[in-house]
Amino acid sequence: MEQDKRRPTQRGKTTVARERPRDPSARPKSPRPQRGNAADREAARRERLARSEASGDTEASTRRKAEPRKPAPKRPKPQPKRKKAKKPHRVYNTNFGFKFLVMLAVVAVIVLSMIIFFKVKHIEVLLPQGENGEKAYYTAEEIIEASGINLDENLLSLSKATVAARIHAALPYVNDIQVKKQLPGTVIISFSEFDVSYAIQDETGAWWLMSREGRILEATEEKEAKTHLYVTGMLIQKPEIGDFIQPASSAGADPSEIGAKHAVVLEVIPALEGSSFVKQLDRIDVSTSYDLILWWESDRYKIRLGTTENLNYKLQFLQSVLDNNDIQHRSGVIDLTFQEDEKVHFLEFH
């Protein structure tokens, strides 16, 4: 009885098995040997080559001979998969918003208290006293009015520099100003006034009083002007109160010489204020910028200083000359120009 050629497969299915010849010689030969040594494989290769030449495919055979076999590319080794780093878990501070609101509330309270509580309630003015107990040129009411400070104005936002500038602009005799704030609502103003004022004439013939810096203080009459230390030899442009002096030009005058005279006036006046004899001087003559002349006590002494070079040294030397008993009862020219030597020359008037 013939054996059943069928064999079971997966899931109960059956297939018919293909019959294979039992005789190995009856099997079809493969053109390429599946097994064998290198000699058999080389023989098979030559056989294939001969077949291709016989079929006329010489070009392919030539190309195969010429082209060496390329080694098979190496497969990259599989890299182990890296594990993704876990992101750190963020912890949110839920109290931040509350703290921020509290901070804003505190700032608002501080600002509100500054606006409500720190207001100007009192303005105190400290008036200067003269050397001989003289009263100040300005009253406290004039200082307060010139300051522009209003009561109930915010104290902390008040600008001290602005207050000082207002007083300077309105009151020319005021010199140094100090403005202080005192909590909860007081402003203290202290100042000094110019002790010595100087007189100068403008191009129209009018006389003016000015400060040591050359700032116009007020208009005055000629008689009053000559009770002060006044300047001759240079005229100024017609000014406004509070302006600084500007030299007036004249026909045929050298502009550089006019500028030099202006510089001499602004240099000699502050230097004279440091001396003890400034109030005994009558006038300053700058007819020429290189020959500065001072006149002492109703023209008793004519003091020649020359240029302003070494001016402080010359004024100190002058003080020692005036203290000399030999000339105290005489009048004449005191020459401090030091043109020929380093000596002071006295030439008595005749």
Image (spheres, grey):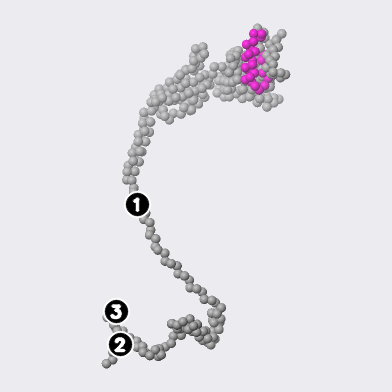
Q: Are dots 1 and 2 in contact, CB under 8 Å?
A: no
| Relative image position of residue 283 (x, y in whole percent) | 63, 15
Name the residue tied to disc 3: 10
Indicate the quadrant where residue 299 lies. top right
Separation of residues labelled 1 and 2 (CA atoms): 68 Å
Q: Secondary structure at mark 2?
A: loop
Which callout, 3 or 1, points at the residue further toward the start of the chain?
3
Which amino acid type corresponds to the residue marked 1 in the rendered image? His
Q: Nearer the viewer, residue 156 or 75?
A: 75
Q: Position of residue 172 (x, y in %)?
A: 53, 21
Image quarter in which the N terminus is found: bottom left
Q: As displayed, is residue 324 above or below residue 125? A: above
Residue lying farthest to the right in this orientation: 340
Whether residue 79 appears in magenta in the rendering, the answer is: no
Residue 13 or residue 225, whichever sits in front: 13
Q: Which residue is mark 1?
A: 89
Between 84 and 45, the residue placed more toward the observer is 45
Q: Residue at x 67, y 18 (%)?
A: 305
Who's the residue at 31% across and 84% down the image? 15
Q: Is residue 327 above or below residue 1?
A: above
* Distance Cα–Cα, label 3 vs label 1: 53 Å
* Helix, strand or loop at mark 1: loop
In which quadrant of the rendered image does the C terminus lie?
Answer: top right
Query: Residue under circle 2?
Result: 5
Span colored in magenta: 302-328
